[in-house]
Amino acid sequence: MINGLKFIPIVFTCLLISNSVLAQKTDLIFLNNGDRVTGEIKELSYGKIRLSTGDIGTIYVEWDKIERIISDKVFEVELQFGTVYYGTIGVASDRRKMAVIGETQTFDLYRAFVVSIRPIRDTFLQRLDGSISLEFNITKTTGVKQLILGGSAMYQSRVWTQSVSFNGQLTSQPEKDDSRRADLNYQAIRYLSNRWFGAGQTALEQNTEQGIDLRASLGAGGGRKLIQTNHMRLYTFVLLSGTRESIRDSSGVRYNMELPVKSMFRVFMFDDPKTDITINLGVFPNLSNLERLRMELDSKLEYEFIKDFSARLNFYYTYDTKPPSATASKEDYTLSTGFVWKF
């Protein structure tokens, strides 16, 4: 699967370059210390504004360090209660507020309650955003070699968010068969009122450790943003999903109906010490075989113990009470640690 998707990074790169060329960097951000930055507001998310500038590249500014914003572009501005406003952004009479100037009315919103700002762009490429990553690890003492490839692309409109993501991991070690884990996901979210949303998802997965040559799934459902502040997020949703599993070392194929329940929890604090904890948990009850239950956990902890120097811990775990192959393991996990220097 990894070889078959080798052109994904090239496609992402071309789209992102085109997107950056079309953008106009005319938004103004005034900081509490008196500084002013000109650029293109990409988004406010998780307590930081992502700003693309012509001179110093992409920068992130903490939301509570901003005094005011001025932009003549149209944005979607969401409060932590789920209320959404559309319009350009100007200066309100109260320094604690920001003005969202709509077509017929201006709204003065307290900045402390604003948790999301998304630009409403005109063209397809302007609405597209994404990233790619490539990592290669070699451990001399054990002879383990590991290739990790990841990428994502997101398309956003007023009421829809569509995203594609890919993650692949190939591990090679002496006197053992190579192990592969890969997944390709497409997700569409339709935003509703009061923090509710509808969701559709399709995925292709491979995990040789658990005997899965290919698992294809298609599902739909809905969920809610239970908590969304500038320091914490908790989302959860439920799907009804059908799956088709091709079993490794066998010509057999299994069809299942599942009821996935997924949650995303994130805590992020940007004042010293900077801490970022993200937990994605999915539980997959099998409606076709009530004795079978799958679970997936993907978590990350990043903690800054010296300025600009952080420790990072990543943990991935998957469990299947009845894997499709008799020789497959019920569980698979990856634990990695490292250090991050930001400059």
Image (spheres, rainbow, N blue to C red):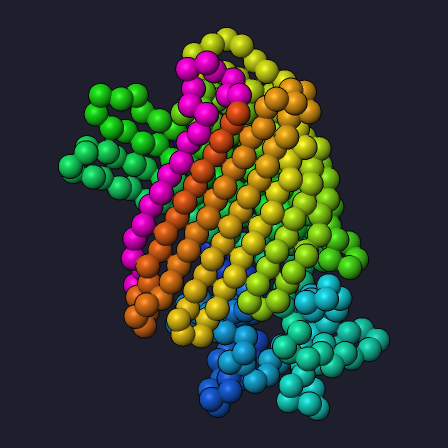
Identified at 19% across, 32% down, the residue is 143
In the picture as drawn, the residue positioned furthest to the right comes out as: 104
Residue 266, given in percent of the width and then of the height, sits at: 53, 57
Write the residue at 20% across / 39% down.
139
Q: Position of residue 79 (x, y in %)?
A: 69, 69
Quick check: 46 left or right of 299? Answer: right
Query: Can residue 12 be spotted in the picture?
Result: no
Image side of residue 310 versus residue 129, left or right: left
For this rendering, which residue is in front, 22 or 302? 302
Please report the bounds of the magenta region as a residue range: 322-343
* Front-most of residues 210 and 164: 210
Q: Quadrant of residue 64?
A: bottom right
Query: Looking at the picture, how far across and down is residue 219, in whole percent?
Result: 68, 33
**In this view, 282 is above or below 65:** above
Quarter assignment of residue 181: top left
Q: Is residue 92 above or below residue 213?
A: below
Which residue is the extreme one toward the left? Answer: 141
Q: Quadrant of the C terminus?
A: bottom left
x, y percentage for residue 306? 30, 70
Q: Is residue 115 above or below residue 221?
A: below
Query: Does residue 302 lie above or below 55 as drawn?
Result: above
Q: Residue at x 50, y 41 (%)?
A: 297
